[in-house]
Image (cartoon, helix red, strand yellow):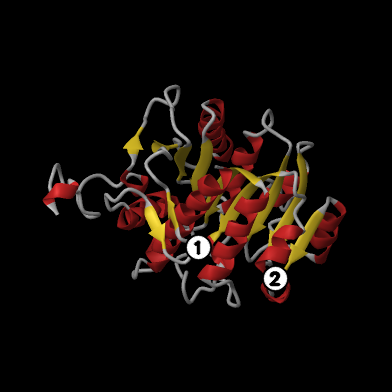
Amino acid sequence: MSGHGYETGRLNLPFVGVSTFAKRELVTDWSQINADVAVLGAPFDFGTQWRAGARFGPRGIREASTLFSFGHSGAYDHEDDVTYLTEDVKIVDIGDADIIHTDTIKSHKNIEKGVRSILKAGALPVVLGGDHSVNIPCVNAFSNSGPIHILQIDAHLDFVDERHGVKYGHGNPMRRAAEKNYVTGLTQVGIRNVSSTSKEGYEDAKAMNSDILSVRQTRRIGPKNLVGRIPKDSNVYVTIDIDAFCPSIAPGTGTPSHGGFLYYEVLEILQHLSKQNKVVGIDLVEVAPDYDHSGSTTILAAQILLNFLGFIFHNQQ
């Protein structure tokens, strides 16, 4: 083994060291981002309507991601016969946006600043939520980087316009996105059962160029046909709410909804998307680690993100 360089330097096992995302370099100066991917934490959960706790999502996902940080050169997938995330894909962690307790507007502005810094550096932004309202500043940051199509993988439509004066909570992000002139359409997948939006909200979404599919409808047509419904020339922003998954595998979330996706269903959607479209941004939201003492939810979040990044950069080559 020593002849292959395995005995030089530190072994650096997952439980050793500092929990940055996948144990990648930490860059705290947002004017000095030089990478293919930059990961930003958005530990904001004031937009929740039931169980809080997603403020600890970024920290939990980062810790779980160390499981996938073993010091091999990339991740070999024997099914695809591809080594993903080789050393020529540079991922950095730029830390967290500052959160101002009780102040949604200032907190969202700080998240937006982080995403704008990533886009200015020419890197792919990956934002770790936080509740789903953090998608609002993420999409705001694309005002000079559009047009974009949004793929939302979620149990809930999140298309509420305004309720009791609230316009920027976690039930509003897809409505706020659809209002943008640089958002050309939405594909909303996994939406099911007792949901977050009234019938009028569904009607509004469809009128604003949204394609809505439940888990069962998605299973009937399959991941490839689902992705085929997305315009092939679109740059796609992907927002993943962890409650899109069945709570049997992802209980660590504020609003769990039974009947959700399993791991490979979402993974195959993302793999087909990376072959068909350019992915320009990602957020993964609503991970609330304290509701899942097994750690399954945070591991799922980290595993989905790292596999998705592998697909994106392999298929861009």
Q: How far apart are marks 1 and 2 (CA)?
A: 28 Å
Q: Between label 1 and label 2, give the one nearer the viewer.
A: 2
Q: Residues within 10 Å of mark 2 (few under 14, many from 20)?
A: many
Q: Can residue 172 be seen in this view?
A: no
- Reading the image, the residue beneath label 1 is 51
Q: Quadrant of the N terminus?
A: bottom left
- Reading the image, the residue beneath label 2 is 218
> On screen, 119 above or below 255?
above
Q: Residues within 10 Å of mark 1 (few under 14, many from 20)?
A: few
Q: Which mark is residue 162?
A: none
Horizontal side of 54 relative to 64 (left or right) equals: right
* Front residue of 127 and 120: 120
> On screen, 32 above or below 141?
above
Q: Residue at x 67, y 31 (%)?
A: 145
Q: Residue 122 falls in which quadrant of the image?
A: top right
Q: Can residue 105 be seen in this view?
A: yes
Q: What residue type is labelled 2?
A: Thr
Q: What residue type is labelled 1?
A: Arg
Q: Residue 60 falls in which quadrant of the image?
A: bottom left
Q: Estimate the x, y position of residue 96 in percent, counting from the top left.
A: 42, 38
Q: Residue at x 53, y 69 (%)?
A: 264
Which element is circle 1 on?
Answer: loop
Q: Which residue is drawn at 42% across and 65% down?
A: 78
Mark 1 near mark 2, Cβ–Cβ under 8 Å? no
Q: Residue 28 falls in which quadrant of the image?
A: top left
Q: Estimate the x, y position of residue 66 in percent, counting from the top left.
A: 31, 53
* Front residue of 139 and 169: 139
Which element is circle 2 on?
Answer: helix
